[in-house]
Amino acid sequence: MARLADIKLKICGMRDAENIQAVTALSPQYMGFIFYRKSPRFVGDDFVMPAISPGIKKVGVFVNETTENILRIASRYDLTLIQLHGHETPEQCRDLKAKGLSVIKVFSVGEDFDWSTVQPYKSLADFFLFDTKGKYYGGNAQAFDWSLLQKYDQEIPFFLSGGLSPENIDDVDRLKGMNLYALDVNSGVEDSPGVKNASKIESVLEKLKSLK
């Protein structure tokens, strides 16, 4: 289990070149790019990836996409991890890993979430990501009841997502002893969809450093 002070940070929903460079200067460990057309943070068909520090891992976010298209996009943008946010099968995870990609499998958590759902993915995903169950595939901008994570067996390290912002980062202290690997922050540090506020990200980073 990672210590809270070692929690990584992923800034997701990036697409503007100047904004990407500003966030790169803050050195989050992960940066997420959404390749799902229905997302308000979709990078667009003509997206050009600006130079990013090799210390920041690039994550491609996909929803019910074909393996062929994921591999094509991963190659084009030199993605390190693939985040699967839809109803992807364990077999698709296996196929992506066979191509040398790391996989983050997302599960939307609500009061009625069946935790046995994660079981078939345990040997195939490098990480899980637990997000808030809602109308959209991510981007619901609401936190779920984190006490539900007590029902998780903690075998696979996980990213925590859903409504995270400078205002509630301190509450992550409640997750001590869990296999929390990283925080996935998106709308909670935005000025507008896809445009992040550097000061808000700095605030998140400072609060993460203060967690013990």
Image: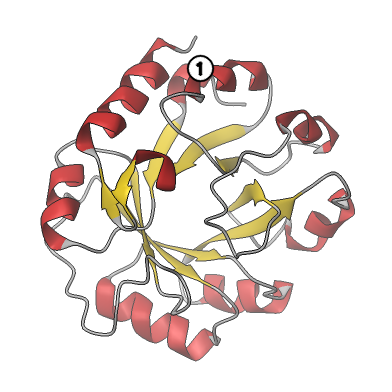
Residue at the farthest front position: 192
Residue 195, compared with residue 170, is above or below; it is below
> Please, is residue 159 above or below residue 52 in the view?
above
Residue of label 1: 170
Colour style of the rendered protein structure: secondary structure
Report the front residue among 199 and 70.
199
x, y (%) of residue 127? 59, 50
Q: Residue at x 19, y 54 (%)?
A: 20
Residue at horizontal 80 percent and vertical 35 percent from the top: 148
Residue that appears at 45% across and 70% down:
39
Label 1 element class: helix
Residue 25 location (% of width, % of height): 14, 39
* Along the line of sight, the residue nearer the viewer: 188 or 52: 188
Residue at 61% x, 64% y: name it.
136
Q: Amino acid at mark 1?
A: Asp
User: From the viewer's perspective, is 194 left or right of 123?
Assistant: left
To which quarter of the image does residue 96 belong? bottom right
Indicate the position of residue 107 as horizontal and vertical percent values.
69, 56
